[in-house]
Amino acid sequence: MTDNDVSTPTMERCVTSYPVRRRYRPGVVHPPEISTVRDAIDIHCHAHEGQQDALALAKYASECGMAGILFKTITGMSNEGATVRQIEDDLATWAGETDFRPVRCWAGHLLGASGEAPTVEEAVQSIDGGVIALWLPVFNHANTYATVGGRNIWWDKDADPDAHSEPLPWDQALDLGHYLLDSAGALKSDIKDILKVIAERDVALFFGHATHKEIFLIAEEVVRLGIRCAVIDHPYSPFVNLSVAQMKELAAAGILLNFTFDELSPLLGVDPAKMYAAIREVGVEHFTLSSDAGEPLFPNSVEAMRLVRGYMEAFGLTQDELYQTCTVNPARVIGEPALANLAEARAAMR
């Protein structure tokens, strides 16, 4: 990890936040409909047990004119493709009774979520089931356990289901969690094989909560294999914690950087001025904006998209740059550039 504190002391943050909040005037907001998310594609949305309802969210996103939602997690956390297809069927029925165009929905899969090491078989089965994006381990990666701990029941079936550990020492985190490197410090052969499948099947790769060493070794494989689209989520989160220099290096390899509302939320507290500055320095063509929402402590994903877009617009992203980061670049992730053309046609009609 680098020492890359992207929070800002309260007094200093006030100096940057008050000018933008006073001049940002996108128009009067009439809840619940949100017009400023029109044509957006959220590539990082959560809707598993205890979180936001996927169908209700899809209806709301349709009402607000969003173009698409990629569900990183969905109820059941298995057979995600079939679950999302059912949501699309139900959404189409609802749309037929309304005047709204149904938002497009896609399924992702989180490798290693069961606790077992990620395998090629898991990746292939998910893709065959309709998944269009694979995430490398996240909540049960050793890096996560060492940074924020985890629920004790994940590694101790007799533990209190509500108990949550403190951050674990690295050796213990490594023993309990996923790690993508072998004892020699190279990518494990199973991970290389998974990356090869991702390249061959033309689905998107998300790096998960990988450490810096893992990230840069995966990036080498992305280039070598010609993986169409690779994404690093929440680069300013404590799990990833990239510097601007590192972002530039990864962007030069063709990897997208996905800033999220989660980073801006009070739970992580990234300074939006620093997020905007990173986008401006590295280049809007290398970034996407998404919600990473679903937790009850967060706004729903549509509102989270409004907020992350709004912050970046307030600090200086133009309408063309918002379109780039919220529609064109996400359409690359989905593998359907026609969606960007659809959104462009919609924009021309307004």
Image (cartoon, rainbow, N blue to C red):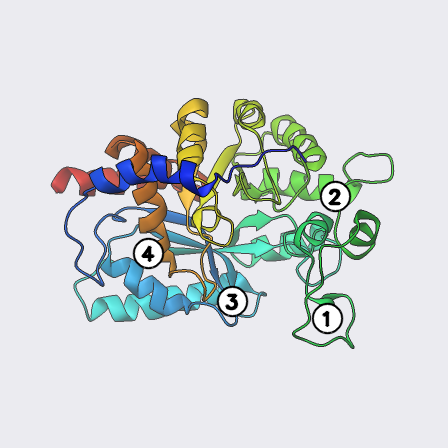
Q: Residue at x 45, y 67 (%)?
A: 296
Distance between mark 3 and mark 1 Cα atoms:
18 Å
Q: Which residue is mark 4?
A: 303
Neighbour tally class for label 4: few under 14, some 14-19, many 20 plus, Cα within 10 Å = many
**Which mark is nearer the camera, 3 or 4?**
4
Q: Which residue is mark 1?
A: 153
Q: Are marks 3 and 4 in contact (CB under 8 Å)?
A: no
**Which mark is nearer the camera, 1 or 2?**
1
Q: Are marks 4 and 1 in contact (CB under 8 Å)?
A: no
User: Could you tell me residue 253's position as x and y percent?
Assistant: 56, 24
User: Could you tell me residue 220's position as x and y percent?
Assistant: 66, 27
Distance between mark 2 and mark 3 Cα atoms:
25 Å
Of the two numbered discs 4 and 1 on the same chain, state the one appearing first in sequence.
1
Q: Are marks 4 and 2 in contact (CB under 8 Å)?
A: no
Q: Which residue is mark 3?
A: 48
User: Could you tell me residue 100's position as x and y percent?
Assistant: 20, 61
Amino acid found under the numbered disc labelled 3: His
Q: Quadrant of the C terminus?
A: top left
Q: Which mark is residue 180?
A: 2
Distance between mark 4 and mark 1 Cα atoms:
32 Å
Q: Residue at x 58, y 49 (%)?
A: 134
**Which mark is nearer the camera, 4 or 2?**
4
Distance between mark 1 and mark 2 Cα atoms:
23 Å
Q: Nearer the viewer, residue 10 or 44?
A: 10
Q: Are marks 3 and 1 in contact (CB under 8 Å)?
A: no
Relative to 223, residue 322 above or below? below
